[in-house]
Image (cartoon, helix red, strand yellow):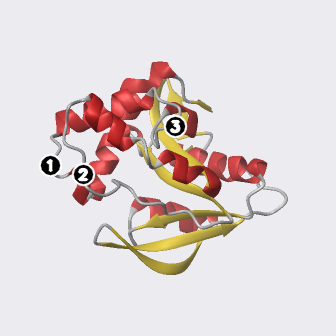
């Protein structure tokens, strides 16, 4: 079942985001222990303007537990979400990085998909013949269409599960981009009048 994330999902969603950020190996977070990052994400989850706060999230719930999450927002919203890390580092008495943890990625005409991940234990489970990740991606496209954006954008490592999923939905690679010493492919999906679920 797809639904808006709530404060009750804090533990499950913070762990999903933690694992994804560990995979990304962000340079600015290397001095932060896994425990500190987990705390930071848990505290930030409750803040409405944090990049990984619950207002930006939709979850896929299975048997009452959030087992997948998608984070996204219109491009105009992204700059407001990038400035919350410093306050969180200070609150947890951790030395904040000198540069932003995550730089803005969204192009001006996009609804940007920042993160989409499913707990590995549920990655190969289906509901009505669709993977949980497929349900989340379909929901992303619906949310973007409802926002009035012309495109959905995301940055991926070629060959990653998210890149494969996006290709199945019709996303097209448009440019190579460099973030935090990582080269990523920017994908875009043109919003049409009607999206099939």
Q: Position of residue 35 (x, y in %)?
A: 18, 33
- Could you say which disc has been placed on residue 59 in the image? none
What distance separates the C-alpha of mark 1 from that of mark 2?
9 Å
- The outermost residue toward the right is 193
What distance separates the C-alpha of mark 1 from that of mark 3?
24 Å
Let me know if residue 99 appears in the view: yes
Let me know if residue 120 appears in the view: no
What distance separates the C-alpha of mark 2 from that of mark 3?
19 Å
Report whether 140 appears left or right of 93: right
Q: At 55% across and 29% down in the image, what residue appears?
A: 5
Crowd rating for badge 1 (residues with CA inside 10 Å; few <14, some 14–19, many 20+) = few
Report whether 133 appears left or right of 141: left
Residue ID for mark 3: 49
Report whether 98 appears left or right of 141: left
Camera-nearest residue between 86 and 29: 86
Q: Is residue 24 above or below residue 5?
A: below
- Label count reads 3
Which badge, 1 or 3, comes first in the chain's sequence?
1
Which badge, 2 or 3, comes first in the chain's sequence?
3
Q: Position of residue 109 (x, y in %)?
A: 69, 65
Q: Is residue 1 above or below residue 175?
A: above
Residue ID for mark 1: 31
Q: Mark 1 or mark 2: which is in front? A: 2
Camera-nearest residue between 108 and 139: 108
Which badge, 1 or 2, comes first in the chain's sequence?
1
Q: Secondary structure at mark 1?
A: loop
Residue ID for mark 2: 97
Is the C-beta separation of discs 1 and 2 under 8 Å?
A: yes
Q: At 19% across and 42% down in the image, what residue appears?
A: 95
Q: Position of residue 7 (x, y in %)?
A: 49, 21
Is the C-beta separation of discs 1 and 3 under 8 Å?
A: no
């Amino acid at each position: 079942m797809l639904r808006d994330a709530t404060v009750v999902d804090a533990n499950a969603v913070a762990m999903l985001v933690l694992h994804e950020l560990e995979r990304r190996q962000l340079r600015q977070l290397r001095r932060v222990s896994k425990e500190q990052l987990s705390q930071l994400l848990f505290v930030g989850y409750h803040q409405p303007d944090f990049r990984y706060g619950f207002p930006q999230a939709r979850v896929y719930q299975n048997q009452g537990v959030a087992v997948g999450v998608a984070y996204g927002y219109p491009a105009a919203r992204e700059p407001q979400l990038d400035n919350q890390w410093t306050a969180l580092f200070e609150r947890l008495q951790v030395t904040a990085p000198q540069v932003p943890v995550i730089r803005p990625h969204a192009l001006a005409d996009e609804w940007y998909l920042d993160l989409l991940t499913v707990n590995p234990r549920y990655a190969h489970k289906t509901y009505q013949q669709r993977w949980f990740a497929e349900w989340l991606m379909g929901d992303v496209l619906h949310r973007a269409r409802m926002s009035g954006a012309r495109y959905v954008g995301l940055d991926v490592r070629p060959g990653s599960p998210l890149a494969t999923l996006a290709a199945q939905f019709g996303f097209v690679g448009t440019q190579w981009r460099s973030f935090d010493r990582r080269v990523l492919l920017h994908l875009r999906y043109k919003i049409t009048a009607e999206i099939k679920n």
